[in-house]
Amino acid sequence: MPAHPKKRSYLWKIYQWITLAMMLPLILFALIAFVKVEQAVLDNEYQANKKILYQVKYNITFLDEMIVNSILSMYYSPGISHLIFNNHVDFEEMLNEVNKIKTSHVGINPFIHSIYLYNGTTKTYYTTRDELLFKDVSFETMLQSKQELPKLKPLPRKIEYSIGSDKKRYENVITYLMYDFQDDFNQPEGALVVNASTEWLLKNIKDINMVDAKRQDKIIILDDQSEIVGKDLDDAQLQEALKAVYQQHDNGSVSSEKTGYFTDDIQGKKYLITYTYVDEMNWTLVKAQIYDEVFRKINILKYTLLVIIVAIMIMALMASIFISQKIYKPIGNLVKHVVSNVSEMGPSYEKDEISYLNNAYQFSIEQLKQYKLEKQSDREILKTYFLRKLIIDSRSVTDDEFVKAISELGVSLSQYEPGIVCIVKVDNRTQFEQMFSHFDRDLVVYGIMNISLEIFAETFNVEAVEMKNDHIAFILNTADTDKKDLHCDITRLWSMAQGYISRYYKVSMSIYISDVSESLRDLTEKYDEALNNSVYRLLFGKSCILSNHITRANTNNGQVGYSASLDKKLVDSLKSGNALSTEGTLNKIFFDEIAKLSYNNVFLAVIHLVNTLKEMTKEMNRARLEPLQINFNLLSQQLFSSETLQEQHDTILQICRHVLLKTERAETDKHAIIANTIVELIHADYSNPAMCLQFVADKLNLSAKQVSKTFNSQYARSVADYINDVRLEKATEWLQNSNLNMKDILQKIGLENESYFYKLFKKKYGVPPKEYVLNKQLKEIRKLE
């Protein structure tokens, strides 16, 4: 009884591993997706908040600039100077000036709340409010603080209004002061005071942020004292809580950064809080969003993704069952086949199918070893000896020996019937010997012989013997076969054998079929002829099936080598660096001419080609700084060990590509040297009016066309443009750092035509020279401020 495995136990293992392989990546993907999507949304929301805050920041900065510009334009006007510095001010004159300010500044600038004209001598101030002599308690307190008041800097404060006996109203403003002198108590002797409207600023912020209004987003402004600028009474409690949370996080890690975000709880809700710092105002913008509102769509996506993943898991389980059964089916069939045919195995019980098949394989190997031992028995040794003798010296085999070989050794051949010898060689012999052990090589050779004999035995009497010099010889009796279609039939059968052997053993083989001998007594002559002509695998490639009819054109070709014109064309193509011509010429040499030669002349032609490349390399190295290094001895060894003409072609092609690459690099280095020399010449002699393309070409003893092409390939610009750029750069240096007049500067940069210089300068810099210098000076002044 054969040893049966556990019933379908390996099927359950396959199902487990496939399910795990499907589920584990899916679960990992889901976890990573949840984390990554949440972080991506958070980062995306942060970027959107940054854009809003930057827009608010820009508006605040723009507001600051407009107010400062308005103050400067008003402060130095004679009418205002008179009101803030004179001891005696005419009331009518003062009224006219205040009305003028109302009309020209307050009326057209919605961000200006009011303007004060403070006279330090009389300790009074005039306002653009409806009450001309309105008393601003907060402002007066600020003046009497005896602290130096900042100029043109925003000062958040509140203006107090009385609306009844005990009731008061407040307006949030941002105050700017401009003055020149102070008295002994640090009070301005005269000042212009502009109050900006906080309400306008907050309304602007709300307009910018209106896209997020449905999500209850809030933005507050904190001054340098961490006080809220323009507190909204409706949201005062939320604003104070947001301020407290920001201050709690502002332990140095937040305020040290210009912008950033964090999350925290405010009034029992989780918020995403984004902040950015306004340098000009020394303010901080803080925006708060309800965290759940930000991630509301992500939560929906999570649930949707979860449902999809569960559905995919269910489908994966069903798929794993289907795939497991499909994978197991050939294993199950194989187990059934082995169980039904391998009855010689012991009755031991196996844990699963693979263990059973492994034991069956080991049992088969033992059987093969036993076969090998039988093969080495006297009968097999004598049969092999007889077949080798028949092939190598067929005329020495007597009739009695032949009869004895048939009756005692089982040889299935007839001595006096026509016969054919087929030479079989395994392709890629070196790789074959490296891939397989000695035992495995014998097993493959046995497989080749066994499969081929089984195919040919249906049509011919056939025997096979392994010869000791890397090939197998097959002997076929062809007495009952139509000679007209004989070679076609044999070729068809060998093609079938090649297919089976390639499929089962992953090796290819080439075959040479001899001509028909009248009897097996003439077999040696046909064998020698077939063995000599089997070398034409070199020309016809691996897996070829050859005969005298196919190789006759090569064997009868008396031409020694390939044409001299192709030899010269190959050398010229390599020297000129023409890769396309080189490969085309090499293809013609190998496949149009060498492929038509006889076997011996093929090697003569290849040796000639190697010598041609060797001489060309010596000639090229005489003119090169870095010589080409090619080991032609190793090249020859590789060529003679190649099995096909295609392999020889590919080896030579690699050498040619190496030569072309080195030639191209040398040409590139040469162009780089020329281009760098041109740059050095221009920088050294740009003041020479004669400096031009032809001047440079004459210096280098090259043609103007060659200089222009080389420089353009390296710098993507013309020599003339580069000369003009150098001269203009030097001119800007003289304009900024010297007091030379334009005529002297033109002389120093080598230009004589002033109008041409102005045209070049304006084309490059967009403005005339004087305006360019003036713009540079203004930028420097602004940097100092």
Image (spheres, grey):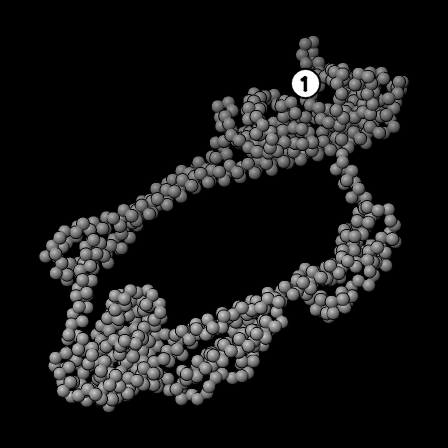
Q: Residue at x 26, y 48 (%)?
A: 15
Asked which quadrant contains residue 365, the reply is: bottom left
Q: Is residue 357 left or right of residue 776?
A: left
Give coordinates of residue 255: x percent, y percent.
60, 29
User: Is 300 above or below relative to 680?
Assistant: above
Asked which quadrant contains residue 530, the reply is: bottom left
Q: Between residues 128 and 339, which one lies in front from this camera angle?
A: 339
Q: In this view, does 706 lie to the left or right of 12?
A: right
Q: Which residue lies furthest to the bottom in this view?
A: 518
Secondary structure under the numbered disc 1 in the rendered image: strand
Q: Between residues 245 and 609, which one lies in front from this camera angle?
A: 609
Q: Which residue lies furthest to the top in this view?
A: 165
Which three-letter amino acid code belongs to the residue tagged 1?
Answer: Tyr
For residue 476, say whether it is visible: no
Total labels: the figure holds 1
Residue on which the image places disc 1:
170
Q: Is residue 197 left or right of residue 657?
A: right
Give coordinates of residue 215: x percent, y percent.
53, 31
For residue 12, say whether it is visible: yes
Give coordinates of residue 279: x percent, y percent.
67, 32
Q: Tell me if mark 1 has few (under 14), some (14-19) or many (20+) residues whose alpha carbon lies within 10 angstroms of its own.
A: few
Q: Residue at x 39, y 77 (%)?
A: 538
Quadrant holding the N terminus: bottom left
Quadrant holding the C terminus: top right
Q: Between residues 91 and 278, which one lies in front from this camera angle?
A: 278
User: Is 328 above or below relative to 367?
Assistant: above
Q: Is residue 601 left or right of residue 282?
A: left
Q: Which residue is drawn at 44% across and 81% down?
A: 602
